[in-house]
Image: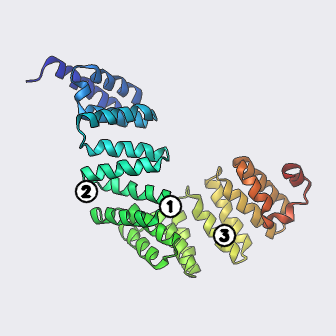
Amino acid sequence: MMTKKDYMKNNYKNIANQFYEENQLMKALKFYQKAYGIEGGKEDVELLLDLALLYDELEDYRSAKEKYKEVLKIDEKEARAYYGLAIIYDREKEYKEAIAYYHKAIEMDDCYDRAYFFLADAYDQMGDKDQAIYYYKKVIDLEPEDIWAYINLGSIYEELNKNEDALEMMKKSLEIDPNHYMGLFNMGVILKKLGQKDEAIGYYRKSIEENHNYPYSFLNLAVLYKEEKEYKEAIKVITKGIEYNPETWVLYYNRGCFYTHENLLEKGLRDIIKATTLYPDAMDYMKRDKELDPIRGLKAYMIMFE
């Protein structure tokens, strides 16, 4: 039989859920906290998980961790609480802690595909490529249509110069979604490494068509033209990339380098200055880049960098 307090708690939860769906997060938090304060609220696992998720979304990670740990005091086998803790530690780049909690989530639920997925990524961030490969394969076993598992696994193979394996993974990703910008981009990367430059150009261009806001498709395509000494085409491509991604320093920096090959030194210098404005840490690298030698004698360069 539902008591008056149960009714009040559930009513607060329903109001909170409605505010959450409307993206009014602070109002949702207010009513979740009201439900938490009702007798029985502190033992309501679903309420505690909702609170933890909301605190996480509000970037109050300390409170989110507290709520997940409250869940585990009630039910030490609750996989979602271990996973939630893992996600927070992952976001904080505390990968060892994250990995431990992902493993606990999987121990409680061996079909928890998202735990496997982010466990693989955490191992990748730690530089343990073998474990990353192993767990991405586990994701694919559980979710054969998980496109990002194929893309990420293929990217690791490419890093390891296992290019045929990488190519196979990217082909599988594009079987799932032929128009996925990241699958198309990575196909360009791999085919270029395999010496198939014309095919790589096609994939980079298709990636750009699918997502103008991914700057590295423009960058890689432009660099490919530069390597072929087609500097005008390289400048044209990267300029288009800047139009869509005006805050991406690496595009200005590379266009500045391209301009030096066309003896457009003033334009090159303007781009280098813009790049360093957007990302000051790049200045030391630029000082060592021999490709910029032609503009070092310009007065504005010496004022800016010397």
Residue extending furthest toward the bottom: 195
Q: Amino acid at mark 1?
A: Gly
Residue 83, above or below 217: above
Is 291 positioned to the left or the right of 147 in the image?
right
Q: Amino acid at mark 2?
A: Cys
The spot of residue 150 in percent (x, y) is 40, 66
Q: Is the N terminus in the top left, top right, bottom left or bottom right quadrant?
A: top left
The label shown at residue 111 is 2
The label shown at residue 284 is none
The spot of residue 264 in percent (x, y) is 83, 64
Q: Residue at x 38, y 72 (%)?
A: 172
Is 232 positioned to the left or the right of 29 in the image?
right
Nearer the viewer's eye, disc 1 or disc 2? Answer: 1
Nearer the viewer's eye, disc 2 or disc 3? Answer: 2
Is 252 positioned to the left or the right of 103 in the image?
right
Nearer the viewer's eye, disc 1 or disc 3? Answer: 1
Is 176 positioned to the left or the right of 290 in the image?
left
Say few, some or many: other residues with alpha carbon within 10 Å of mark 3 (under 14 / 14 to 19 / 20 or more).
many
Residue extending furthest toward the left: 1
The label shown at residue 223 is 3
The label shown at residue 127 is 1
- In 3D space, how far apart are the residues under numbered discs 2 and 3 (Cα atoms)? 43 Å
Tell how many labels: 3
- Sequence-first disc among 2 and 3: 2
Q: Amino acid at mark 3?
A: Val
Is residue 151 visible in this depiction of the protein? no
Badges 1 and 2: C-beta atoms under 8 Å apart? no
